[in-house]
Amino acid sequence: MTFRVGLLGRGTVGAAFSELLEERAPTIEAAIGQRPEISGVLTRSEGDFDEVVAGSDLVVELIGGVEPAREYILGAMAAGKHVVTANKAVLSQHSEEIYEAARAAGVQLRFEAAVGGVVPVIRVIHETLAAAHIDRVHGIVNGTTNFILSEMTRTGASYDEALAEAQELGYAEADPSEDVSGRDAAAKMAIIARLAFGVPINLDEVPYEGIEHLTADDIAYAKELGLSLKLVGTAERLDGGISVRVYPAFLYGAHPLASVGGSFNAVTIESPAITEITLSGPGAGGPQTASAVLGDVISAMIPPPTLPAPAVPQPLVTDVVSAFYLHLEVADRPGVLAQIAEILGLQEVSVKSVVQKGLGDDARLEMVLHPVLESKFKAAVGLIARLEFMRSAPRFVRVIEETFEESP
């Protein structure tokens, strides 16, 4: 029996998916009794949407972006077709509308490839851990930025040099802004938070920071303190609400994310029922994403599916506790450190360690600070920035101090 697959978009991922489906079709047929075949394709230059949908049992959306992808997904569902998508942009901004359309039409919606490449974080959160009370999901969900930071750490390259290498190898787009600004990771964390906590959250509600401002000096001095630098996404229950955010952070070596290098992604899921599990694998590339898409197609061929339960609003927490690394360029004269320490103390910011480097008439201070409310830390940084002996604007990066130990 043939299972007809309509394909919307045949770029890098779409072409890789078509090739993989054709290659694996005999094996799939032998396993489940149905043979998936591409029944129609829609691109900018070929195909008709209505005809592709009418001739399919399932539609794979690999166009990307918000529109017309959203319109096509809703249209396919209204026609009674299952949908598989790798589109994080549309899901992070219109998930509730799309989930409701799938429920109303009684069709499946699968989107493993939208988050984490081949790392099965969506399936694990939504299905495997459906009975667990998840407290936090914490991870590296953008392979491009992880590659850039890994190269800066490994070779001492500047941000611009590492970005150029990522573009040359195909890990970064010609316009890398979605990745390096943190917006891509924020979209993925919005999707994860919706599944983990049942909270309606839009991409626009997720604060994010990127890696463009980070320097080779930051990484070099952090290495002296036993730290590694990652772009981290966090979604967690906090103070009676939910906090979702993306930010660069220094990790100590024992943290499960600290050793994840190159373009790999990794996600740690924490719950009282399981303590924590970490999933890791390639996070970028056409073949990898195509593999996750085909996995979703196979899942959709085997009913019954489940959709996320209707969302329940909860407060969003934005002022959270974090440790920080603080980089200061100052005049090298008596009393400077004392004034800085006084300002930090007035804002209840405690210093854990300090490294000072002389630069002739100037000096560089590298501090690691104990955990404190972000609002208090940023208030202190704002006051320090106005001091007359400052030679440049302060730079800071969050530090994740926790580690995880194996259960006995």
Image (cartoon, rainbow, N blue to C red):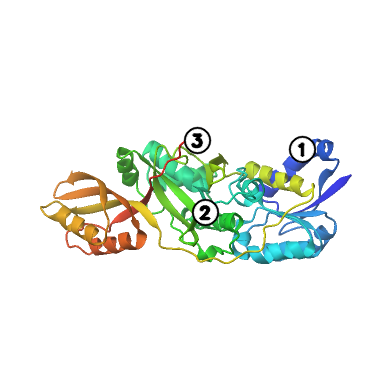
Q: Nearer the viewer, residue 297 or 303?
A: 303
- Whichever of labels 2 and 3 marks the residue nearer the N terminus, that label is 2
Residue 157 higher or lower than 242, as above or below? above
Q: Nearer the viewer, residue 52 or 332?
A: 332
> Disc 2 or disc 3, which is closer to the eye?
3
Residue 188 higher or lower than 20, as above or below? below
Residue 322 occupies which quadrant of the picture?
bottom left
- Whichever of labels 1 and 2 marks the residue nearer the N terminus, that label is 1
The spot of residue 52 in percent (x, y) is 81, 58
Q: Secondary structure at mark 1?
A: helix
Q: Which residue is mark 1?
A: 24
Going 64% across and 57% down the picture, which residue do you hit?
64
Marks 1 and 3 sit apart, C-alpha to C-alpha, by 39 Å
Report the disc number at residue 185: 2
The spot of residue 289 in percent (x, y) is 64, 45
Give the residue type at disc 3. Answer: Ser
**Residue situated furthest right in the rendering:** 1
> Disc 1 or disc 2, which is closer to the eye?
2
Q: Are marks 2 and 3 in contact (CB under 8 Å)?
A: no
Q: Which residue is mark 3?
A: 407
Q: Is residue 351 left or right of residue 280?
A: left
Marks 2 and 3 sit apart, C-alpha to C-alpha, by 30 Å
Q: Secondary structure at mark 3?
A: loop
Disc 3 residue crowd, few under 14, some 14–19, many 20+, Cα 10 Å = few
> Disc 1 or disc 3, which is closer to the eye?
3
Residue 161 occupies which quadrant of the picture?
top left
Disc 1 residue crowd, few under 14, some 14–19, many 20+, Cα 10 Å = few
